[in-house]
Amino acid sequence: MPDASKLPVVVVTGFLGSGKTTLISRLLEHPALGETAVIVNELGEVGIDHHLLRRVDERTVLLKNGCVCCSLRGDLAEELRELLSRRERGEIPRFERVVVETTGVADPGPVAYTLLAEPVVRHHYRLESVVATVDAVLGLRGPESVRQVAAADAVVVTKPDLAEPGPLVEALGRLNPAADVAAASFGAVEPARLFAGSEREPPLVAPSPAHVGEEIRAVSVVLDEPLDWTAFGIWLTMLLQARGQDVLRVKGLLDVGGDGPVLLNAVQHVVHPPVHLDAWPDGDRRSRLVFIGRGLDASAIETSLRAFDAASRG
Amino acid sequence: MCALCGALASEHWAEAGGGRRARVFRVRLVNRVLGQFGLRLDDWGGRIYLLRDLKGRSAVVSDLGSLWVEAERLAGRPLDPLDPELVRALA
């Protein structure tokens, strides 16, 4: 289960004008949310009236030999550390959660990497959920927008009063079958639907593959037999090195022979610490994995994973 | 943690827990894969690994993430787990 001693962080991403700030403003009004600190990159037209609002200038530090998704967001790490210090000194209320609003073109990879890899930050915080907003009128807008939706645990289609959101909700659900996709006017969404999303189980079988811009698609693999965890770790690390540029997201529920499954969640190269669940969400104990990326072939993935697993028993 | 930059983390996600026996098993299984590319991995004191090729070149790696980066460099080509030849050899 997730480490309750760490403060949950919710990342809200989405294209400029897609309703991120409206969503956050509305969420902050919800009585269930509790004391929340908000970190924003830019002060937009819609103001957030909140006493724990902090602004940062997006600053990405590309690590030596690192790829873009594995770069540290220095500004974010600094701000998260500062929030902790001020909380400890009693200068600000003892907030229970942090919401980070990214810029419209921000790649969620470095944000996730900062939360999972920066030593001080990962000791005190955990990435609870990535929420992406998509404008019902304008839809997906370029590769940044696709990466944001692929990385999301929940997707909110905004402004459904201006355009019928049904087809877009359906298309986004096919692009990211692991996410909860919903339409909402003026940020009216239950917080529970957006939070704890990284712990949400992926579907057993992905709907018919979605094609975005001819290339990006979601594919799913279901395996009847338990997997060897060591073989899986070797296989996935190798896959992410060889095809990391093409794999935007991996989410899965794996039967590794225990009572409950292992929940696996990766955004680009960044793999969340796997979570051992106490029990399966339903009677079906088959391993299920969803991959979102370019040029992915479910059959090739399954054959390869089975071969690695077979090698572990040979 | 990051598959490519796992060295930053205290323990790579794929190697967490398990202890000595799991490490020995991991090295044996990795070598089934690396053997197809003329490479070999050895555990070095239970803390790091030594990766070698047939020409005697070597690299020290800390975990599975950095292993594949170095293996690709020594092999001079990407090591793709979906490569049908590799899959046939392992199955």
Image (cartoon, coloured by chain):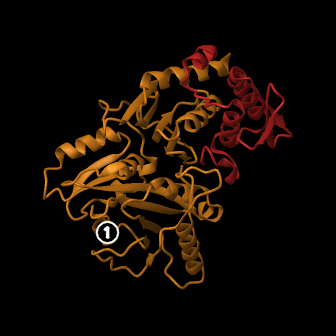
Q: Quadrant of residue A212?
A: top left
Q: Quadrant of residue B77?
A: top right
The image shows residue B81 at horizontal and vertical percentages of: 58, 27
Q: Quadrant of residue B73?
A: top right
In the displayed structure image, the side of residue A194 where residue B75 appears, left or right: right
The image shows residue A256 at horizontal and vertical percentages of: 57, 30
Q: Residue at x 41, y 31 (%)?
A: A295
- For the colour red, the matching chain is B
Q: Residue at x 63, y 14 (%)?
A: B89
Q: Secondary structure at mark 1?
A: helix
Q: Determine the residue located farthest toward the right in the rendered image.
A: B45
The quarter of the image holding the C terminus of chain A is top right
Position above or below: A129 against A51: above
Residue A4 visible, this angle:
no
Which residue bears the numbered disc 1? A21
- Amino acid type indicated by mark 1: Thr
